[in-house]
Amino acid sequence: MSPITTARLTLLPIDLYTYEALFAGSSDLAAHLSIQVPEILSEFGMDIFRYTHGVLADDASEGPWWLYLFIHRAEKALVGVGGYKGKPDQSGMVEIGYEVYPAYRNQGLATETAQGLIDNAFKHPDVKIIQAHTLAEMNASVRVLEKCGMRFNDAFDDPNEGPVWQWKVVRPK
């Protein structure tokens, strides 16, 4: 699994060894990666980490299509998490998601991350469409996706999130 490099960040795919450090706690993850790591790794809880660990443990080839740690190289700090929600589906669609920690927001890092995930996905010939979802309101995530060339595609009620907007970008020709 290869990292994704952007201007300021390394998006590091989480391998099984890194999951072990992550589950041991922030100080173990910090020592494992030789970076600063916040106490809370996601405002959404640890379930996503447990789920993706299980996916990767079952099939290592899934690794590039799940979670990444967003590392600010100059600051040697973990600034967020996110990635893809699985391999491309039959239509060639992948979905991205990202979370930048509050102390690092409003610095363009979410846009840099989302663009890095988009660019990386389009390096794979099977990927034709990239989607993302936001809450159904104008917010920072909407602006990030628009800056990355994504366009509004649909609105619907998600069983877990409630009303959401779907965004997409199609592979350039």
Image (cartoon, rainbow, N blue to C red):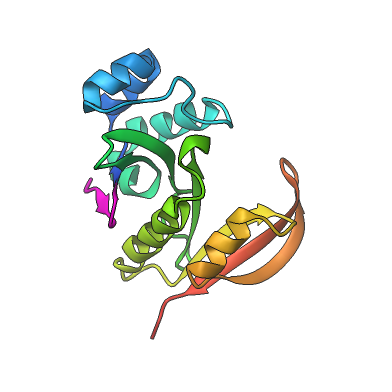
The x and y percentages for residue 60 are: 28, 39
Q: With 50 as the anchor, is 36 left or right in this view?
A: left
Q: In which quadrant is the N terminus drawn?
A: top left
Q: With 101 as the anchor, is 70 left or right in this view?
A: left
Q: Main secondary structure of the magenta part?
A: loop
Can residue 76 be seen at all in this image of the molecule? yes
- Which of 93 and 111 lies nearest the eye of the viewer? 111
Q: Which residue is depicted at the point 65% across and 54% down? A: 134
- Which of 80 and 15 lies nearest the eye of the viewer? 80
The x and y percentages for residue 153 are: 66, 71
The x and y percentages for residue 31 are: 24, 19
When the figure is inspected, residue 34 is found, relative to residue 107, above or below; the finding is: above
Q: Residue furthest bottom?
A: 173
Q: With 141 as the anchor, is 147 left or right in this view?
A: left
When the figure is inspected, residue 52 is found, relative to residue 162, above or below; the finding is: above
The mark total stands at 0
Residue 3 falls inside the magenta stretch: yes
- Which of 88 and 81 lies nearest the eye of the viewer? 81
Q: Which residues are magenta?
A: 1-9
Q: Which residue is depicted at the point 21% across and 48% down? A: 2
The x and y percentages for residue 47 are: 54, 27
Q: Which residue is depicted at the point 38% across and 86% down? A: 173
When the figure is inspected, residue 89 is found, relative to residue 135, above or below; the finding is: below
Can residue 91 be seen at all in this image of the molecule? no
Residue 173 falls inside the magenta stretch: no
Q: Which residue is depicted at the point 51% across and 50% down? A: 106
